[in-house]
Image (cartoon, rainbow, N blue to C red):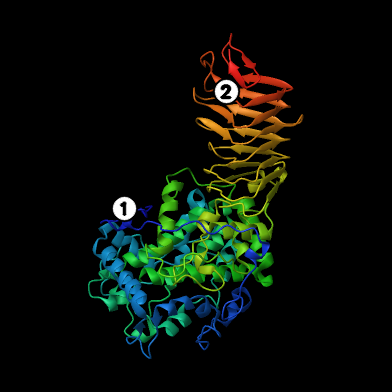
């Protein structure tokens, strides 16, 4: 039976956990995306230093990435004698445990079951929920299984249950038809991906040891270590593992990129609901996982494996979706709220909020399959323009891993900080043939669309550098898709907006250009703030509004110069025509 994962959290905490981020500072200097090393060097080069004997930020790359935690916490000589540093440390770490108290004391019975399952079932198995309609197919073809039922065993409060996977003792089989995908998950979760060395170094207690008001799920009591020295809270190992598996799947199946990330955030969130971890623990687990996944995906030894995993997904998994069923990640807006609020769990910015975004060396690989038509530097600009602001001192590592917001990055640029040229080859299929950018894009840069694919712009955009369409199709799916700029079209522009599409500057269309306006209601139109330099074809699609009122304006401008080579109508009722004047196109 499919379990419900998105159970509304009791109490007011869910509403209170609002993202307090502000946009990152704009940049035009290419040096803005140059990597900066941490105390450990560059993580992707040093990730194999994450072993137990390395116990310093300089010697252990994971400890180095998580070292901002030392701004508010000083590890002690034992598990119970560390120190909260200063007023900020006390404030943040007290809030950290208070959030645990609130979430654990207000969890529902359904959440208690899910928190138990998230703890006891293999995190690779839990990550599969992010595959949506491909989940069942993956499980069948990869022989992915769990030995634990989707319920709390009656004797769980006295007996520790562990997931034994399938009949081969694995969560899924590397010898299956999806074996490369399985192997990619296993490789990313390899021998240098453990959070245990960092737990030993930071010596930060689990929340139920900080306060007896933290309500641990009773069925998880047998899972609590009797040796607190070996059972630290920071960072969360389950969160790290859940994100590592999810990022591996997102690389192989970028069609489910944001769903996989949302599911990873669910895995982390249930660690808090269970009473096993705090928000700081979970944020630490997420941060180290992004760095570890990027390191493994950048490792030349894994180049063929990741290519094979992507090929399996394209040629096998994506061609065999399960029967359509309601998934828990269909609501993109709700997913964004969930993921973004868990970036900081409403912790305040106690540090400098004005520092520019930093993009870690190699982080762009995390977007490699999601944006195959962008080059490495362009993917770095995407990460730069969607990152979390500075000032969350526990996330402000030198390289920038803690500030990466991969969910936002999955929707494309957040700002055109340089001029952006996109070349999409539709013959390749996938995202090369069709993609959507849903972020609100700011900045002073321009957008140039080349190639044969289709790109849709969905955001409430404010970029000012202009739009140039030289190939394929650029679709406006929002009133300000083209920002505040002029537009020139030498290929195809399609309007698909409820209401007016606005071009604040001039609109110029060459002889080879096509402009398609889809008219679905009386308010639909193209409003050009400057001059229209007409050319090419104007196509007016009235399929969903065949009887517009006479006198309705479908295009307006300060001035229309020249003439369209043709004005075509589709679906317009018999007897109605359109007329092009020197300032408008009007239904007659």
Q: In the structure shown, which secondary structural element does the residue marked by tag 1 occupy?
A: loop
Q: In the structure shown, which secondary structural element does the residue marked by tag 2 occupy?
A: strand
Residue drawn at 31 percent across, 74 percent down:
207
Which label lies toward us, 1 or 2?
2
Task: Mark 1: give few (<14), some (14-19) or many (20+) Cα within 10 Å.
Answer: few
Q: Nearer the viewer, residue 179 or 381?
A: 381
**Residue 306 located left or right of residue 23:** right
User: Residue 530 is drawn in which quadrant?
Assistant: top right
Name the outermost residue toward the top: 575
Number of callouts: 2
Tell me the tag on residue 554. 2
Residue 573 image position (x, y, % from top left): 56, 13
Residue 338 image position (x, y, % from top left): 40, 55
Q: CA distance from mark 1 to mark 2?
A: 44 Å
Residue drawn at 69 percent across, 30 percent down:
514
The C terminus is located in which quarter?
A: top right
User: Residue 292 is drawn in which quadrant?
Assistant: bottom right
Q: Is residue 254 above or below residue 214?
A: above
**Which residue was labeled with disc 1?**
8
Name the outermost residue toward the bottom: 77
**Residue 155 located left or right of residue 556:** left
Name the outermost residue toward the right: 511
Residue 520 image position (x, y, % from top left): 52, 25
Q: Is residue 341 above or below residue 290?
A: above
Q: Earlier in the sequence, mark 1 or mark 2?
A: 1
**Residue 116 located left or right of residue 178:** left
| Residue 276 visible, this orientation | no
Q: Nearer the viewer, residue 526 or 115?
A: 526
Residue 246 image position (x, y, % from top left): 51, 61
Residue drawn at 27 percent across, 56 percent down:
12
| Residue 223 visible, this orientation | yes
């Amino acid at each position: 039976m499919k379990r419900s994962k998105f159970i509304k959290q009791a109490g007011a905490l869910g509403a209170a956990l609002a993202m307090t981020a502000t946009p990152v500072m704009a940049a035009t200097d290419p040096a803005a995306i140059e990597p900066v090393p941490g105390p450990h060097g560059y993580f992707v080069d040093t990730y194999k230093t994450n072993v137990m004997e390395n116990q310093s930020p300089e010697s252990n790359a994971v400890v180095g990435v998580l070292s901002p935690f030392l701004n508010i916490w000083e590890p002690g000589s034992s598990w119970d004698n560390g120190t909260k540093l200063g007023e900020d440390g006390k404030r943040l770490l007290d809030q950290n445990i208070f959030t645990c108290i609130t979430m654990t004391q207000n969890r529902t019975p359904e959440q208690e079951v899910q928190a138990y399952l998230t703890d006891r079932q293999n995190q690779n198995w839990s990550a599969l929920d992010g595959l949506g309609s491909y989940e069942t197919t993956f499980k069948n073809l990869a022989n992915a299984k769990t030995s634990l039922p989707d319920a709390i065993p009656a004797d769980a409060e006295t007996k520790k249950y562990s997931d034994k996977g399938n009949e081969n003792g694995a969560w899924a089989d590397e010898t299956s038809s999806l074996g490369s995908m399985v192997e990619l998950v296993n490789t990313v979760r390899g021998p240098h991906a453990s959070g245990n060395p960092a737990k030993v170094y930071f010596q930060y207690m689990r929340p139920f040891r900080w306060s007896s008001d933290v309500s641990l799920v009773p069925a998880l009591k047998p899972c609590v270590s009797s040796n607190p020295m070996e059972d630290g809270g920071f960072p969360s190992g389950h969160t790290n593992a859940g994100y590592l598996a999810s990022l591996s799947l997102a690389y192989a199946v970028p069609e489910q990129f944001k769903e996989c990330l949302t599911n990873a955030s669910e895995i982390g969130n249930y660690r808090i609901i269970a009473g096993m971890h705090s928000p700081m623990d979970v944020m630490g687990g997420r941060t180290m996982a992004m760095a570890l996944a990027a390191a493994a995906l950048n490792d030349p030894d894994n180049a063929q494996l990741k290519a094979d995993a992507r090929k399996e997904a394209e040629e096998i998994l994506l061609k065999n979706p399960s029967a359509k069923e309601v998934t828990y990640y269909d609501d993109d807006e709700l997913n964004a709220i969930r993921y973004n609020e868990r970036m900081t769990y409403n912790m305040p910015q106690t540090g400098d909020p004005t520092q520019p975004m930093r993009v870690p060396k190699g982080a762009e690989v995390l977007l490699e399959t999601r944006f195959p038509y962008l080059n490495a530097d362009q993917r770095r600009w995407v990460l730069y323009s969607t990152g979390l602001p500075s000032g969350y001192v526990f996330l402000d590592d030198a390289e920038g891993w803690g500030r990466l917001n991969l969910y936002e990055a999955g929707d494309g640029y957040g700002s055109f900080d340089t001029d952006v040229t996109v070349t999409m080859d539709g013959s390749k299929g996938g995202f090369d043939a069709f993609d959507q950018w849903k972020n609100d894009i700011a900045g002073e840069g321009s957008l140039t669309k080349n190639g044969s694919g289709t790109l849709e712009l969905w955001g409430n955009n404010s970029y000012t550098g202009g739009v140039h369409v030289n190939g394929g199709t650029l679709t406006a799916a929002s009133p300000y898709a083209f920002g505040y700029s002029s537009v020139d079209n030498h290929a195809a522009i399609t309007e698909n907006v409820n209401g007016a599409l606005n071009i604040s500057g001039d609109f110029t269309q060459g002889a080879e250009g096509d402009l398609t306006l889809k008219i679905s209601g009386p308010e639909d139109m193209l409003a050009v703030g400057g001059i229209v330099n007409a050319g090419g074809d104007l196509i007016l699609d009235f399929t969903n509004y065949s009887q517009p009122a006479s006198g309705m304006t479908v295009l307006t401008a300060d001035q229309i110069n020249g003439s369209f080579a043709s004005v075509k109508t589709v679906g317009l009722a018999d007897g109605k025509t359109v007329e092009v004047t020197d300032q408008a196109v009007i239904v007659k």
